[in-house]
């Protein structure tokens, strides 16, 4: 798990406890000494757990565990108010349908007010804590080329992850003192141990791909074993930092020797059974939505309800993907083109179902037929695959696994409609192929649900 992911998980656990404490405090405010009996005899602790689950779910849906979304304090306040409001509506509905779950008259309102106040003050403190330079891990980059600068740029763009680049170290004396981006070149490779002590370095990131001289293995070994300095190859650091694999830093040998746990390997064997079960559940749950969608498409514009299109699957095998038709029947009279922002080929109903991803629901049948998985890289059209394989290195590696209904690239990057976008999404696809696991799949499913609810990233 990345450092950012570890922070989010720790924050989720702590805030879950904080939410429960607010519920308990509300009970004591309302009932005084009788609150203990309500907690134990009245099974109040189970009701507080329900309160916690709903509130934390609302925080997750409101992006409060994505630090990139809440860098501005005003945005943070609005998101917390939005999350508590959403939780209040959800809980009000639950209590209306199941009144026996109520903790007691007034406790619901008091607990939500306590949570709102507590969470605002707590999150302001967390923002200060994470962004404080003295608490950040101090990183020294061994390299001075473009790749080293790109790694530093990612750290600067994600200040909330708790890293601070103190500078670069290289072999060229002419670069000493030169500012490559914001940090500057602070010394030479021969001075590595002195620089680590002088700048109180916690981690050294080694950019291997651009070095023409041998690594200072003696110094690195002493720093690692004697001083406990963390030393990491730039591709691995970049992967943990961004949740994607840099094509620029990637070396095939690094992927070849990457390891998976036994549990992850077992999970791969069970994937087909999980896919079939998930697709069947998805079909049953979505049948009413699909029936309404089919009727709306038929009434909105002439043409078929469903649309099939050839795509490339695992092992470069071709198959026909099934979707609800969201465009006019003559949308590709001039040949295949990528979808555009505000595409005029999209029908009125098409705009709605594309925004809510309803047009993708018939692909449950592709999953049942074994052509697709529930989670994986999105399948691309053969015409675009031929183009992208010529222009983008390692593009064919995304066909090592089955394509999916949703995937890591879909939740981390908006809709792509160019070679540049395809290259960016490939980096996320490679990350998923390398790191696929049950935990990552659960994260993707939750993120997909949140994206569908808010209708983000569609065209």
Image: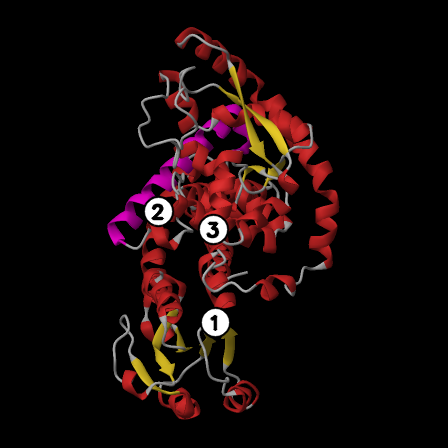
> Where is mark 3, residue-wise?
392
Q: Is residue 396 visible?
A: yes
For marks 2 and 3, give the CA distance: 48 Å
- Mark in the foreground, 2 or 3: 3
Is the residue 416 above or below the residue 154 in the image? Answer: above
Label placed on residue 26: none
Q: Residues within 10 Å of mark 3 (few under 14, many from 20)?
A: some
199 in magenta: no
Q: Give the percent coordinates (x, y) of residue 435.
A: 60, 55
75 in magenta: yes
**Which structural element holds mark 1?**
loop
Label placed on residue 209: 1
Q: Give the percent coordinates (x, y) of residue 392.
A: 47, 51
For marks 1 and 2, give the CA distance: 49 Å
First to last magenta residue range: 72-101
Is the residue 380 above or below the residue 130 in the image? Answer: above
> Where is mark 2, residue-wise?
116
For marks 1 and 3, give the CA distance: 18 Å
């Amino acid at each position: 798990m990345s450092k950012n992911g570890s922070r989010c998980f720790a924050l989720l656990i702590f805030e879950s406890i904080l939410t429960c404490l607010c519920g308990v405090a509300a009970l004591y405010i309302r009932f005084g000494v009788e609150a203990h009996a309500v907690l134990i005899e009245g099974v109040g602790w189970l009701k507080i757990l329900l309160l916690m689950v709903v509130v934390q779910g609302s925080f997750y849906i409101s992006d409060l565990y994505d630090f990139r979304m809440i860098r501005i304090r005003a945005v943070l306040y609005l998101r917390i108010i939005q999350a508590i409001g959403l939780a209040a509506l959800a809980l009000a509905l639950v209590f209306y349908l199941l009144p026996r779950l109520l903790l007691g008259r007034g406790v619901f309102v008091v607990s939500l007010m306590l949570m709102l106040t507590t969470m605002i003050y707590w999150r302001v403190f967390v923002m200060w804590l994470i962004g404080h330079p003295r608490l950040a891990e101090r990183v020294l980059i061994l390299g001075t080329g473009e790749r080293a600068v790109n790694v530093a740029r990612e750290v600067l763009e994600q200040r909330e992850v708790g890293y601070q680049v103190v500078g670069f170290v290289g072999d060229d004396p002419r670069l000493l003192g030169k500012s490559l981006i914001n940090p500057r070149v602070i010394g030479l490779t021969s001075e590595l141990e002195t620089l680590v002590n002088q700048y109180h370095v916690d981690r050294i990131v080694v950019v291997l791909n651009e070095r023409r001289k041998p690594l200072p293995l003696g110094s690195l070994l002493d720093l690692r074993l004697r001083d406990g300095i963390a030393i990491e190859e730039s591709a691995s650091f970049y992967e943990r930092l961004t949740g994607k694999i840099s094509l620029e830093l990637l070396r095939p040998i690094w992927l070849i020797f990457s390891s998976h746990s036994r549990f992850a390997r077992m999970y791969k064997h069970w994937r087909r059974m999980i896919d079939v079960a998930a697709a069947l559940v998805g079909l049953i749950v979505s049948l009413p939505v699909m029936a309404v969608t089919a009727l709306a498409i038929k009434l909105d514009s002439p043409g078929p309800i469903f649309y099939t299109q050839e795509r490339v699957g695992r092992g470069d095998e071709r198959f026909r993907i099934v979707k609800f038709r969201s465009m006019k029947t003559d949308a590709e009279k001039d040949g295949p083109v990528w979808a555009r922002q505000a595409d005029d080929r999209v029908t009125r109903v098409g705009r709605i179902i594309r925004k809510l991803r309803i047009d993708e629901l018939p692909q449950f049948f592709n999953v049942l037929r074994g052509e697709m998985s529930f989670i994986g890289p999105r399948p691309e059209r053969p015409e675009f695959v031929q183009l992208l394989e010529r222009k983008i290195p390692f593009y064919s590696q995304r066909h090592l696994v089955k394509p999916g209904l949703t995937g890591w690239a879909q939740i981390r990057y908006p809709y792509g409609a160019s070679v540049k976008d395809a290259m960016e999404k490939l980096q996320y696809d490679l990350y998923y192929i390398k790191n696929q696991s049950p935990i990552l799949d659960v994260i993707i499913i939750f993120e997909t649900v949140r994206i569908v609810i808010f209708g983000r990233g569609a065209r």
